[in-house]
Image (spheres, helix red, strand yellow):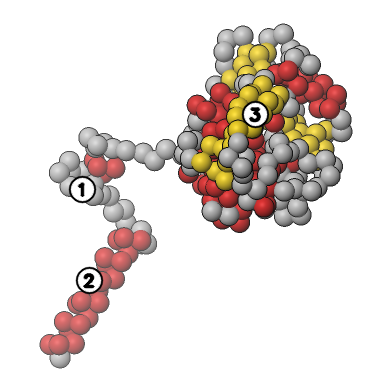
Amino acid sequence: MKCTNKRITACCLILSVFFSLTGCGTSDYAMHYENNQQVSSFQLVQTDNAQTAEPFAADLCVVDSNVSNPDITISDVSAAGLFDLNELNTLYAENVNKQVHPASLTKIMTALVALKYGSTDQILTASENVIITESGAQLCGLKPGDTMTLGQALHILLIYSANDVAILIAEGVGGSVEGFVEMMNEEAQTIGATNCHFVNPNGLTEDEHYVTAYDLYLIFQEALQYDLFNEIIQMASYSTTYTNSDGEEKSLEIETTNQFIKGNYTAPDNVTIIGGKTGTTNAAGHCLILLSRNNSGNPYISIIMNSNTTDDLYEQMSELLKAVQ
């Protein structure tokens, strides 16, 4: 009988603790206000070493729907976006979360992964895979056995948009194209670009190779953290010498594919084009991403995806940049 009473007492004690913790019942159970107790009302509102977690998007422009702007009229594009990097505002957004073909804007991610995991002075050697026969593919003419540094390859990749150099970089940094593409997709997830998927390092059309304009904004902004990337995307031309398979030096001179940098198109008067990347395939149309600054030096990222022609692309981009204040 004494044992039974102990069990009843223990059960009652357990139930009372349970209800006090869950807030059940009609009584209020205030926490003690003591500054020397780790769990107290005092510690909930004041502590000498209080810390808060920084939100993932604290330094990003965020958008989940279209954002109109009375200063902008754009049509016949799949997606477009304008992001104020200083104020962290989305000034314009049209279908920025729509999955589309990226064409050579893919090479921004290729450059980002190469800069993060490679060394600019490492020597890359071309394999048979640099031979690309797709009609219209931009090539610098690499042959198996040709060698150059990663730094040289990145210049050719971003300025001239050479597809064969993208393969050279992927195999040199990732061990194989497949291994490098896996790194691209992992890096995209890491920086929050979760609506894209890469199948190759150059952007030649494949069914499961796609991005969103917003993901490109995230990728481009991350790449801008690297000084060499910033330097290259501003260059109008580039000259270098690499070594062919016979050990002989071969000269290469290239010009940018960015028509703003070449001076063939002009931005609004209050906007200075710093640099960017172009992309063109039949599936993706004409694409362009830019870093610009206003007269006060504030930076902006602007994106046009799937324009019909080169003229349309640059006219639409100029229209988009009208919203820069």
Q: Amino acid at mark 2?
A: Leu
Judge from the rendering whether residue 154 lies leftward or rightward of residue 75; answer left or right: left
- Residue 282: horizontal and vertical position, in percent? 84, 42
| Residue 46 seen | yes
Judge from the rendering whether residue 18 lies leftward or rightward of residue 233; answer left or right: left
- Whether residue 160 is situated above or below residue 293 in the rendered picture: below
Quadrant housing the N terminus: bottom left
Q: Which residue is mark 2?
A: 13
Q: Residue furthest left?
A: 2
Measure how far apart labels 2 and 3 are at the Cα level: 86 Å
Secondary structure of the residue carrying tag 3 is strand
Q: Which residue is mark 3?
A: 251
- Which residue is depicted at the point 48% across and 40% down? 122
Residue mark closest to the camera, 2 vs 3: 3
Secondary structure of the residue carrying tag 2 is helix
Secondary structure of the residue carrying tag 1 is loop
**Label 1 packing within 10 angstroms: few (<14), some (14-19), many (20+):** few
- Which residue is depicted at the point 39% across and 40% down? 53
- Residue 280: horizontal and vertical position, in percent? 78, 36
| Residue 184 seen | no
**Label 3 packing within 10 angstroms: few (<14), some (14-19), many (20+):** few
Q: Which residue is mark 1?
A: 38
- Whether residue 250 is situated above or below residue 199 in the rendered picture: above
Comes first in the chain, label 3 or label 1: 1
Measure how far apart labels 2 and 1 are at the Cα level: 24 Å
